[in-house]
Image (spheres, rainbow, N blue to C red):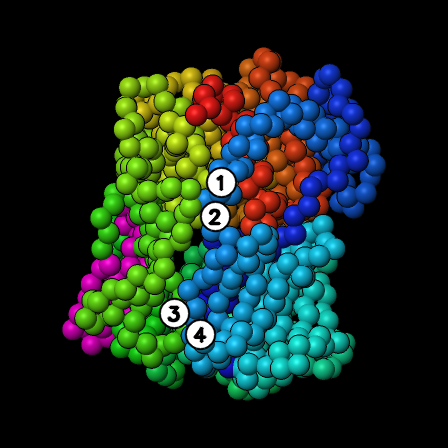
Amino acid sequence: MSLHPAVRTALLSLGLPLLITACQSVNDNAPAAADLPPVAERIDHVVEAPAGSRTDPYYWLRDDSRSNEKVLDYLRAENAWFHRHMERLAPRTEKLYGEIVGRIKQDDSSVPVRHRGYWYYVRFAEGQEYPVYARRRGDMTAPEEILLDGNTLAEGHGFFQIGDYEVSDNGRWLVWAEDTIGRRQYVLRFKDLETGTMLDDRIEGVSADLVWAADDSTLFYIENDPDTLLGKRVKRHRLGTPTSQDVLVYEEPDESYYLAIGRTGDERFLVIHSSSTVSDELRYVAADQPQQPFTVLAARERDFEYDADHIDNRWIIRTNWQAPNFRLMEAADSDIADRGKWRELVGHRDDVYIEEFELFRNHLAIGERSEGLKRVRIRRWDGAREDYIGADEAAYVAEIDVNSEQDSEWLRYSYSSLTTPESIYEVHMDSGERRLLKRAPVLGGFDSDNYVTERTWATAADGEKIPVSLLYRKGFQRDGSAALYQYAYGSYGMSMDPYFSTARLSLVDRGMVFAIAHIRGGEEMGRRWYEAGKLLDKRNTFTDFIAVTDHLVAEGYVARDRVAAMGGSAGGLLIGAVANLAPEKYRVLVAHVPFVDVVTTMLDESIPLTTNEYDEWGNPAEKAYYDYMLSYSPYDNVRATAYPAMLVTTGLWDSQVQYWEPAKWVAKLRATATGAAPLLYKTNMEAGHGGKSGRFQRYRETAEEYAFVLDQLGVAER
């Protein structure tokens, strides 16, 4: 049977993102750094728009081919300037890197997950950067079968990423998606797990999503548009046949929708999921009848969102239909097409946001958010029992983990906080018996009792209370002298939870306070929290972040002149906006792969992801949105003022935030900003949006970032 999605998630992550990236040092071919930072040439270019036109002097830095030597020379010169500045901090960088890596248990492995007679797990060997994905048949004493060895596959590649993989129902055929450029444009490859031989089948230009049908020979995948790079067509491939014979199953007509494919928890149905910011549409077909056409579960309509899973001849649907914070409904197979026959299972609440659910034969597990915290509720189908999984800390994350078998009476969940490493538990859903399966090891003398996590609330300009999660070392004195490292994201309804991080210990061990600002634009406080931080309310995201800084200063947690802030991607937009709105309140800012050229990007439908984003940011072809986006776009609002010290990073092959956005932003800052604070810009010439992510190598960039921040904040070495 197909490898359950939850199992794939477990195998694709062990304290890592859902990818493997081969990490090599950046090959800049950079000229020797001069005594002054590089200055980009100004070449005026008019950006036309229905609502107005603008002159962009650095538009020439855009090169879709990534081959223009003039552009590459500029990026190399910036890299040379970065390395020159960081030479002085090399000893501190190495010390930080040694600390962070020294906390990692090198020969580690995940908790095995049972599925269809096999135990699946991921493990690391000492000294190796990448994981090995493996399984054992029957029990964990059986011989190991290696599915994929990330270390072997990464050899010879400046960049290598596994986006997803899946094992066929009979356990024999393996397919995986790999990317050797960093643009998230994958190639599907196939392997016979019985013989270990590679098959000739090879499918290029696809997304990472893939799923086997129940016949052990039919694979469904998503073909990308070659220009926008978005998933466009679902196709059906029969093992051993030419790709020219692959059958088009579904083509998405609306450029604002993303495509995903998968399988229900009981594995009876294959599902195609079309989703935009404000709408969903699911199609399904029996997994053992892959040649049949897909059936629409519920037709799309604006502001109607839903997802669904299947158990015992009925569908369970999570939906915002007449329920902004979502509710759960159920419908028999025969009634699913008639929304009027859907029955409410778990009702809507204004103070609880339903985020996810998991189905079991006798129980329903619900992942919820309330008061900015994530927790798990368990209830029997017969209504005889309902319980929450408890916690003893002020700020924590409890969430449903890998559960691959619906017949189980045990729920596996994870627990983490800013002071507690990720812990995998299982709880008996009737008796309440709880077992700790694994707590992520942290070496180097770590003791969670040496650290404190706290929840405080800042008041926004309009009176909203903004939750803030804090971490500091025990013995910390709230006397207004400490340095602060503040983080947030604040877009797409993505919540930034207070997870544990070994790297952050290197900050708080030096007396710093670490803070996560749960600002509007995320969903920490429910759907309204997201709605109040997008479109024409986007500025709330930025002013919330500044209000959190002001609160932590006013309450004596930190010193006014020792504040650092960091964000990435849309969180980099946050950092760019904050830099323009309140540069005097921050000593140093860090922006990773930042989305900072909002208007120009959103005007260009040829750029990947643009049309999918209109419901998040607005369509600048309409004057109201054009004017509003122009009022906060970081690139467009750079002004002659003294900006904080800044570190900006990007990847040349990033397909989500194109490298030229931060390149243009930095060029304009260099030409416009006053003051003497350093501005550093680093382009990873062999990576995309995720940057480096090898188990150890990715921490080199973290160490560089921390060394820069600590130096600018005047934090003494210990």
Residue at (72% x, 65% y) in the render = 204
Range of magenta residues:
364-389
Foreground residue, 357 or 272?
357
Q: How many labels, in total?
A: 4
Residue at (66% x, 77% y) in the render = 196
Residue marked by disc 1: 100
Whether the residues at callouts 2 and 1 have beta carbons within 8 Å, the answer is yes
Please identify the dominant SS of the magenta region: strand
Q: Position of residue 279 (x, y in %)?
A: 47, 59
Whether the residues at callouts 2 and 4 have beta carbons within 8 Å, the answer is no
Does the magenta segment cover residue 11? no
Q: Specify the amino acid type for callout 2.
A: Ile
Which class describes the residues within 10 Å of circle 4: few (<14), some (14-19), or many (20+)?
Answer: few
Q: Specify the amino acid type for callout 4.
A: Met
Q: Nearer the viewer, mark 4 or mark 3?
A: 4
Which class describes the residues within 10 Å of circle 1: few (<14), some (14-19), or many (20+)?
Answer: many
